Image: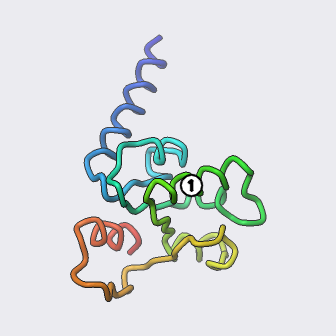
Amino acid sequence: MRTTLAVLLGLSLGTLAQAADPDLVIAGHGASLEQAVAAPHAPTYRLLVLRKELVRVRASRAEDEVRALIERARHGGAVVFVCERDLRAERLQPADLLPGIVAVDASDVWVNGTPSEADLRLKSLCS
């Protein structure tokens, strides 16, 4: 019973952490891809897929459910990102991922105006 409560509390805290920044939702850092997409978010938001969940969005291995989930996220306003350092660690290239996923690192320059807080946090997480 205590273990179940601890797991539920951990999941709740992970969801609260996601809700703290509705412009940046993170999968693979305390939340699965499914939990991240289901978390409260802004009408347009950044979905960052970190290393733990990265292998799930690899085009050659992605299950139909994952493909549908990414498509649902995009229709819900998400731009999906991965960190280049995670790609290097897994020996992957951006072309190995599902179409439309953007690789980012700390040196990326945002040319469309001043970066938002979510952009700065995204870059920080990927540095």
Q: Give the image location of residue 56, x and y in percent.
A: 66, 56
Quarter of the image for the C terminus: give it.
bottom left
Name the quadrant containing residue 46.
bottom left
The outermost residue toward the right is 60
In the image: residue 16, left or right of residue 68? left
Image height check: is 48 above or below 3?
A: below
Name the amino acid, label 1. Answer: Lys
Image height check: is 73 above or below 99?
A: above
Q: Give the image location of residue 108, x and y in percent.
A: 38, 85
Q: Please name whichever residue, 10 or 65, is drawn nearer the observer in this view of the structure.
A: 65
Q: What is the basis of the colouring in this image?
A: rainbow
In the image: residue 123, left or right of residue 70? left
Q: Which residue is mark 1?
A: 52
Q: Give the image location of residue 31, x and y in percent.
A: 47, 44
In the image: residue 42, left or right of residue 102? left
Image height check: is 39 above or below 107?
A: above
Rate crowding at label 1 as few (under 14), some (14 to 19) or many (20 or more) other CA atoms within 10 Å.
some
Q: Residue at x 33, y 84 (%)?
A: 110
Name the quadrant containing residue 62.
bottom right
Q: Please name whichever residue, 77 or 122, is drawn nearer the observer in this view of the structure.
A: 77
Image height check: is 56 above or below 15?
A: below
**SS class of the residue under badge 1?**
helix
Name the quadrant containing residue 104.
bottom left
Q: Please name whichever residue, 83 or 45, is drawn nearer the observer in this view of the structure.
A: 45
Q: Residue at x 48, y 71 (%)?
A: 83
Q: Give the total of numbered labels.
A: 1
Q: Residue at x 50, y 60 (%)?
A: 50
